[in-house]
Image (cartoon, rainbow, N blue to C red):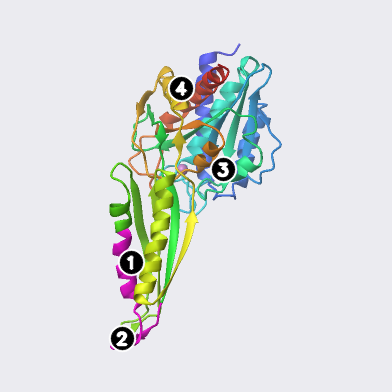
Amino acid sequence: MSNPMTDIAALSGWLTDFRHELHRFPELSNQEFATTARLRAALEKHQIRILPLDLATGLVVELGGQQPGPLVVLRADIDALPIDEKSGVPFSSEHPGVMHACGHDFHSASALGAAILLKAQEAELPGRVRILFQPAEETGQGAPAVIAAGALDGATAIFGIHNDPALPVGVMGSKAGALTAGVDRFRIDITGTGSHAARPHEGNDPVVIAGQLITTLQTLISRNVPSDENAVLSITQVHSGSTWNVIPDSAWLEGTVRTFSQTVREQIEQRLRDVLSGLGTAFNAQIALDWQPGPPSVVNSETWVDLALETGRQSGFDARRIAANPIGEDFAFYQQHLPGAFIMIGSGGPYALHHPQFRVDDAALFPTSQWLANLAVQALKKAAE
Ligand code: NI
């Protein structure tokens, strides 16, 4: 006879080991072949149904279906980052220059745990639960690929998680409305005429134009965004010139815009174009903009956030309302198709996401699996109302 308590302890220990293994062998976006194989082997071992979707990496599984009812979706991401690990944990990355510095190993292992727990009650599930092990979150390409493969077809609601080292273990947080930022990237190329440093009147100095541009762009936030809205514009690279006595003929800058509403997002892009066009005319230079839109803001449904946090409390979490966070998340693409909620899970580390010393407290793992399984069941009941 198996003892259920021993089974739970054994499953928790096994999941922790599984997470450490994913951590040791991290893979970059769209290259998660070994990660997918590890997940596939674990899922098959537990006889969990893998859907035959056309995905190069990543997996979608489904549980339930013996009872009629709705379909709800849980999503975890599986990819790592191009960062050299300095965490010092004994299961540190064995792939130089690649690291699970965003805790997607934690997300995958939590979702795997939820799948195993749901499998144990599959016959009684009042509907179906799909779990997405999504590739390429870091590049924003994964969610659109999973959607195109049909993973959301027939679903009523979707839930996603991200660990948050700023929250202690045992705490979860979310909010209705915009939770993460819309993330856009831009590059500006200034092409003027170079000259001798002593004869600037014979050219039009791209360095001076770049200087003007950097200060002017900050007014897009301070003078265009209403005081009750938030936005960030950061210029993160400036390049021009190669020596001390020559005025170069070009300069380029790169940066990012973070916004929490589509209106503000579109407004900043338009104002950026206006300012560049005006400066180009004023300085008689060519200024080109390459605007690369990333994922929009994660916008949570009130109903599903309430359910997720309430289920969190029932599962022993301190479930809180938190402020919006200007990170980017490609979970937002799913919410363009169906409502859902994205929840931050306390992972209690001293280092921020994407830091080379980032680490996750193992104690956060199994409670997250238990809550996710619980949430899936409660969401099926709610969706059937
Ligand atoms: Ni992440």
Which of marks 2 and 1 precedes in the sequence? 2
Q: Is residue 211 part of the magenta span, yes or no?
A: yes
The C terminus - image quarter: top right
Q: Is residue 295 part of the magenta span, yes or no?
A: no
Marks 1/4: CA distance? 47 Å
The N terminus - image quarter: top right
Residue 243 on image: x %, y %: 34, 81
Judging by the rendered image, the residue that carries numbered circle 1 is 213
Which of marks 2 and 3 precedes in the sequence? 3
Marks 3/4: CA distance? 23 Å
Give the numbered dot on residue 143: 3
Task: Quadrant for residue 249, please give it.
Answer: bottom left
Horizontal side of residue 288 vs 156, given as left or right: left
Horizontal side of residue 384 vs 324, given as left or right: right
Which of marks 4 and 3 precedes in the sequence? 3
> SS of the residue at dot 1?
helix
Judging by the rendered image, the residue that carries numbered circle 4 is 307
